[in-house]
Amino acid sequence: VKITGVATRSFPAAAGCMVALQSDEGISGVGVSRRDPHGDLERFVDEVLVGEDPRAVTGLWQRMLTASARGVSGGLESEVLAVLDVALWDLKAKSHDEPLWKTLGGTRPRVKAHAGDCPSAASDADLVRWYGTFVRDYGITGAKLRASQDRDADLRRIEMMQRLLEAHTAEPVLMIDADERWSPKESVGRMRELEERFDLTWVEAPAARWDFLGHKRVSNGIRSAVCAGGRLDTLGSFLPHLHHHALDVVQIDTGRMGITAALQVADAAYGFELPVALCASPGNFDAHLAAVLPYCMSMEILDPVPIQGTFTTDVRIQEGWAVAGDRPGNGLASAA
Amino acid sequence: VKITGYRSEVYLMKMDRAVGDANLPEGVDLLPGSILYLETDENITGISLGFGGGAVKMLFPAIEGADPREAAGLWIRMNDWLHKAGNRGEGNAALSAIDIALWDLKAKIAGQPVWRLLGARQGRVKAYASGLDYCLSDEELFAFYRRMAEQGIDSGKLKVGLDLKVDLRRLGLMREALSIASARPQLMIDSNEYWSPKQAVRYIRQLEERFDLLWVEEPARRWDYDGLRLVSQQVSAAVATAENVNSLADVYPLIANQAVDVLNVSALHSGVTGCRQIANMAHAYDLPVSMMNCQANFMAQLAAALPNHTMMEVVDPGREHCLKFSSRIEAGHIELGNAPGFGIEVDETRLAALQANPPVGKGRFPFPRREGAGRYLVPPAQGEVPWKRGRDPQP
């Protein structure tokens, strides 16, 4: 199998773009990025990937990193490299005629799912609708709230979220997303106040993404776990966090890391006995990856099904789990 | 595809020459061998070479009926299966053997060599020569490294630890033998945990007055991260270790405490899956890994796919009498070819013959630790090694 070129298709409605790597055998590998690729994607693919065998995913990831660092085609952003890696893995799985989870070596293609942040500007009514849908239609038992400037509103909204989940489970999993907007000490203060009333599983991004000392301070100061890493885009950038035991849950965004580097980070985290959480992914295709991670805790869901008319997925959210299907590849396909 | 059964064959092999280190300088030429066959409902058989032995029976229920393409998930299941017993000793050997046979199956089902399945761009791995040579005479030592250099190998690792003067002389011989492959051969030494940390520092520094060493292997005990780090800080050479710990869980303290500069990994590091976990964690720390020697160099299939792999150890003492394989050494590299799976087949007739008539020779199972280790040097006695023949009245 040889790579012959690349094509893209934008979805203005969903603020996304499908990237397809074509091969000489008629199959193409796809990935979806959250926005249109910046930089000269076609030239980069021509110089770095065309003529290569897509089954060499690990080697090609190294090749892309090196080429991008050397500035081939001006260098591509990590998010573009990531979607190319996802497309390569899709091609590899399709060339085996098997679902990605099986190509990766996974046994059970399912992972615990939690509801992601309700868009923060939403009213209380929007919030009830958002989490209510997850609970009613998808059996979700865990949910995350993005903290706001209004501390009383946050207390009220966590309670609403908790009540909604309690309709479905006696043990709701509650999480707070600080979204890098607090200083470490502010995180400790805010979390201690919340922890007086709620049992919280984790606080996400309670310090700037690179501030491993800050994350460690927060973790030492609160009961909840510190979950971060979702804004990091290289294996090396996880090193200080892991080495200094700054995180309790290692969060990975395949939209920034691709699959190859995500697997590497997950193995490193496993060495530290740390669970891994996955950020929301297009069509929730990360369920394929989760099946093979040795210590995967939960996967974030923002869209249980993709927006109509964009693309389709074979990952279903049911009874609180994300379950990958058996379609060859990562299950993502352009909608007709 | 479903796993339906297994067959395990054990045998004794006699190598073409003896191998020895600081712990057993007189060497052995007998080795126990074991071959695991994992059978499926589609007539494809997965093979693994190693030390699987009897404990496979305990683990087999964890994978019976499963699809071998789910190898990484099945590794987790086996690791969980061993939770209380621990992924160590015989359990580890069995887990490793099964995992390798699963990857062999997965690759054969895909009709690809393992290196391609694992995502490597080339089935090619840089090799270094390792004589396991404390039992060789100076002439044999030179001949071994010269033969390797003739195949383009420009790096060598010498067994050392018991006699500084002799080790200096033999390092010079190794360098000279390799000098036809490179003007600056890369030199490594291995003392197999014979020294205490400070003893290692003294010894290595004296070697370093005359030789530039790439790495020193196992200069302190396998678990002693304080001692290994001390050596690394006090000598120029890198510290290589980890061959005698078997999983990521056991490697973790070495990495996290910055006690290791190069990680020696092998099939016994919990198979392909476990070995890759270790390599990935090392990669996060920007540490290289080096695959250890094995029959037919089959683990080069994984090494080819590891982004942080440096060189693989090649010994070539003749351990493949009942195996058929297509990999070869060319221009200093192991060339793996395109045979599916690990590219290994068993010559059943020769295996049966070995089992019916076990060879006779020198063997020590399990391999011991030498007197004085960690406390004081006990140099070989007269006649214990060919390089110390004593004052034999020769004409």
Image (spheres, coloured by chain):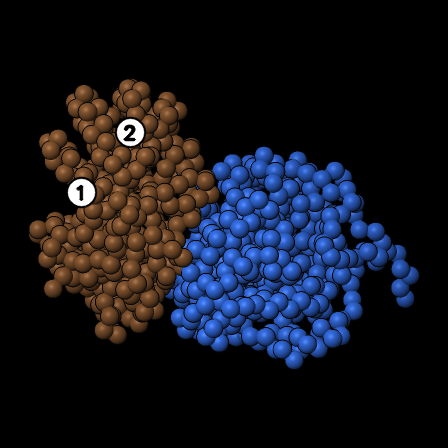
Chain colours: A brown, B blue
- Residue B141 falls in which quadrant of the image? bottom right
**Helix, strand or loop at mark 1:** helix
Q: Residue at 26%, 44% (x, y): give it.
A: A139
Residues A124 and A335: in front is A124
Residue that extends furthest to the left in the rendered view of this protein? A12
Left or right, B280 with respect to A10, comes to: right
Q: Can you tell which quarter of the image residue A205 is in?
A: top left
Q: Foreground: A296 or B216?
A: A296
From the top left corner, tell me how far across and down residue A56 is, in percent: 36, 64
Residue type at the position of mark 2: Pro
Alpha-carbon neighbours of circle 1 within 10 Å: few (<14), some, or many (≥20)? some
Which numbered disc, 1 or 2, marks the residue that appears first in the sequence? 1
Judge depth for marks 1 and 2 and give the one in front. Answer: 1
Q: Residue A272 placed where, x, y %?
A: 45, 39
- Considering depth in this image, is B346 or A166 the residue closer to the camera? A166
Residue plotted at (72% across, 54% down):
B367
- Name the residue located 47 percent from the left edge and 64 percent from the top edge: B65
Residue A121 to residue B213: above or below: above
Q: Mark 2 Cα within 10 Å, few/some/many (few <14, many 20+)?
A: many
Q: List the single residue furthest toward the bottom.
A: B349
Viewport quadrant of the N terminus of chain B:
bottom left
- Chain letter, disc 1 residue: A
Residue A133's disc is 1
Compared with residue A216, is residue A270 higher up or lower down, i.e. above or below?
A: below
Q: Name the residue at 43% across, 36% down.
A: A243
Above or below residue A259? Residue B65 is below
Give the CA separation, mark 1 to mark 2: 27 Å
- Type of residue at label 1? Thr
Disc 2 marks which residue? Answer: A206
Q: Kindly identify which chain the residue marked by label 2 belongs to.
A: A
